[in-house]
């Protein structure tokens, strides 16, 4: 009688391997306020690379560039922001996937719902200082965003990007910014946010 035998294999989380990661980052920061910057520039260039041993996930590398500038006159503030990042291996089988979605991160789409090996984001924010609430600065504003993710370095196409718009109010609580916002993406994509933390 012929019999078929199956040799079980351990699940991935039980397999042992070593992994080494190198990280490099260069940043420049002249913003005047970490919560609601009204003047200054913030820029960052970064890179990561992993090497692996037998049995480990494939080696991977990525690079990223981001920049934000804030400009103000009296109660009016405009912020311009851009981001780009790429997984140079062009594969979704490593840890350096790029994500978009979430408050002021292509806000019409839910948190990290857009995933690919390359991403790009361009954003314009406008804030108006309404006054004070409980002795803390209170703002109203809006943001217009364009961005997208792609799964091949040759797929990048500005025409295929997505648009999103956000209206929001924000309060400088003294321990960090807090926002209440509504975002609308393309089609039926939309999100409501109560967000606490830096969002520029």
Image (cartoon, grey):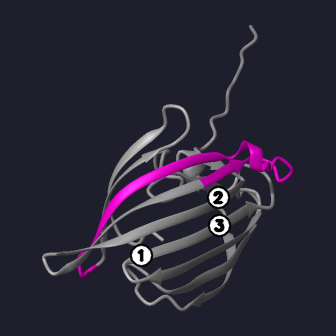
Give me the residue at 48% from left, 46% from top. Answer: 108
Query: Quadrant where the N terminus lies?
Result: top right
109 in magenta: no
Mark closer to the observer (2, 3): 3
- Residue that label 2 marks: 95
Quarter assignment of residue 132: bottom left
Give me the residue at 63% from left, 61% from top. Answer: 122
Provide residue 97's location: percent of width, then percent of height: 65, 55
Provide residue 77's location: percent of width, then percent of height: 45, 76
What SS does tag 3 mark?
A: strand
Q: CA distance from mark 1 to mark 3?
A: 24 Å
Q: CA distance from mark 2 to mark 3?
A: 19 Å
**Up/down of 164 relative to 75, above or below:** above
Q: If you read the primary sequence from the N terminus, does the residue marked by circle 1 or circle 3 appear first? A: 1
**Up/down of 3 relative to 95, above or below:** above
Please tell me which residue lies in front, 104 or 26: 104
Please tell me which residue lies in front, 181 or 18: 181
Residue 40 appears in the rendering: yes
Give me the residue at 67% from left, 27% from top. Answer: 6
- Residue that label 1 marks: 76
């Amino acid at each position: 009688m012929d019999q078929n035998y199956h040799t079980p294999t351990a699940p991935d989380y039980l397999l042992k391997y070593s992994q080494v990661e190198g990280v490099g980052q260069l940043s420049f920061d002249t913003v005047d306020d970490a919560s609601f910057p009204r003047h200054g520039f913030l820029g960052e260039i970064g890179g990561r690379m992993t090497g692996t041993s037998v049995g480990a996930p494939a080696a991977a590398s990525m690079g990223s560039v981001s920049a934000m500038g804030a400009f103000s006159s009296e109660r009016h503030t405009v912020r311009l922001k851009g981001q780009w990042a790429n997984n140079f291996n062009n594969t979704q089988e490593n840890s350096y996937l790029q994500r978009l979605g979430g408050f002021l991160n292509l806000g019409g789409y839910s948190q990290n719902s857009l995933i690919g090996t390359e991403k790009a984001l361009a954003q314009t924010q406008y804030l108006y200082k309404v006054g004070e609430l409980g002795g803390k600065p209170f703002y109203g504003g809006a943001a217009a965003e364009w961005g997208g993710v792609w799964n091949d370095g040759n797929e990048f196409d500005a025409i295929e990007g997505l648009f999103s718009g956000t209206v929001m109010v924000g309060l400088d609580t003294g321990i960090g910014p807090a926002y209440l916002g509504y975002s609308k993406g393309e089609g039926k994509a939309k999100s409501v946010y109560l967000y606490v933390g830096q969002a520029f």
